[in-house]
Image (cartoon, rainbow, N blue to C red):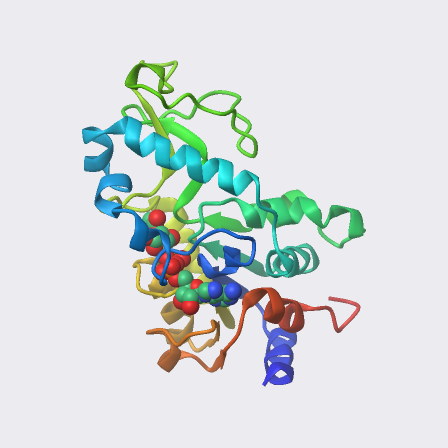
Amino acid sequence: MIEEIRSAIAAARGIVILTGAGVSAESGIPTFREAGGLWARYRPEELATPQGFARDPRKVWEWYEMRRRAVLACAPNPGHEAVARFLRRREDVTVLTQNVDGLHHRAVTGVDEEGPFPLDGSSARARILELHGNLLRSRCSECEVAPAGEPPDHPAALNVDSLESLPRCEACGALLRPDVVWFGEPLNEELLDRAFAVARAADLCLVVGTSAVVHPAAGLPLATRETGGSVCEVNPEPTPLTSFSTWSLRGRSAALLPQILGKTDPSR
Ligand code: OAD
């Protein structure tokens, strides 16, 4: 099956790669819905909703600060790296990620020294759409303004000991919040339109490491399918998208992505 998928990838014009928490599992970042996942240990309504933030912003920041430090202590795995090399080789590839850990971006920088690649890092990074935001960034909870000059990859440690110590917006004084999409919030409309446009135009959608139950992201592979494209799922477990998939590869992304995205034709 892998050879068939590799041929489809070589022939495709326009590929989208929809990723979820499973892609980062082998970097040591917990997923959400599996046994022992984040939503088995924490209450999403307290920690990942605007209402939860309004009730107890310190608690929410404490949780995100813990996750930020955990993400910064992790590194991209061979799955992220295979995607990063693929983005540096082909301009018609777009990554649509639900992950807020920034590891796809870091992987693009990480493979730099293997170059030269046909495409530079900034072109590759521009084709990574973080649909649910990035927990390494903050923005104002009121006026939406992002803090000036905050280096997104290495945010300074926050003091989350008290309400008074939490970060505040320089423009309006309201509390900053993590720049992620919470339950009940809409996704960035422009980003979502772009994601559906590339998914519809793609010949192939790879769906990797997502339980495919959170919409609208879970609808992206269906957009590829509806316009005549193929869907290839990479996941150790079946998902609601399995029956819509042309191919279902059962296994882990860190092992499978290098096999299916690895270089064959030297010109591509
Ligand atoms: P989930 O935790 O729902 O699903 C993780 C998926 O990864 C499961 O289907 C696993 O079988 C699969 N998986 C686990 N290890 C894997 C591995 N090594 N290789 C490949 N796949 C593996 O995570 P998401 O689908 O990403 O939203 O969750 C979607 C959204 O729900 C998240 O973005 C988050 C969450 O609530 C927000 O925070 C807005």
Left or right of 259 on screen, residue 65 = left
Give residue 200's position: percent from left, percent from top.
Answer: 42, 66
Image quadrant where residue 56 sits: top left
- Which residue sits at x=28%, y=40%? 47
- State left or right for residue 100 relative to residue 33: right
Q: Quadrant of the N terminus?
A: bottom right
Image coordinates for residue 160, horizontal then vertical, percent: 37, 24
Above or below: residue 180 compared with residue 211: above
List x then y, in percent, for residue 204: 51, 72
Observer able to see residue 209? no
Residue at left 79%, top 68%? 266
Q: Is residue 264 left or right of residue 143?
A: right
| Quadrant hosting ligand 1 | bottom left
At x 48%, y 49%, the residue is: 129
Q: Nearer the viewer, residue 109 or 216?
A: 109
Image quarter hosting the C terminus: bottom right
Could you tell me which residue is drawn at 43 percent across and 36 percent down? 66
**Residue 216 visible in the snapshot:** yes
Percent across and percent down for residue 168 are 36, 17
Q: How many marks?
A: 0
Q: Reply above or below: 239 against 84.
A: below
Residue 31 in the image: above or below residue 58: below
Of residues 119 and 41, the one drawn nearer to the viewer in this rendering: 41
| Residue 137 figure quarter | top left
Residues 186 and 41: in front is: 41
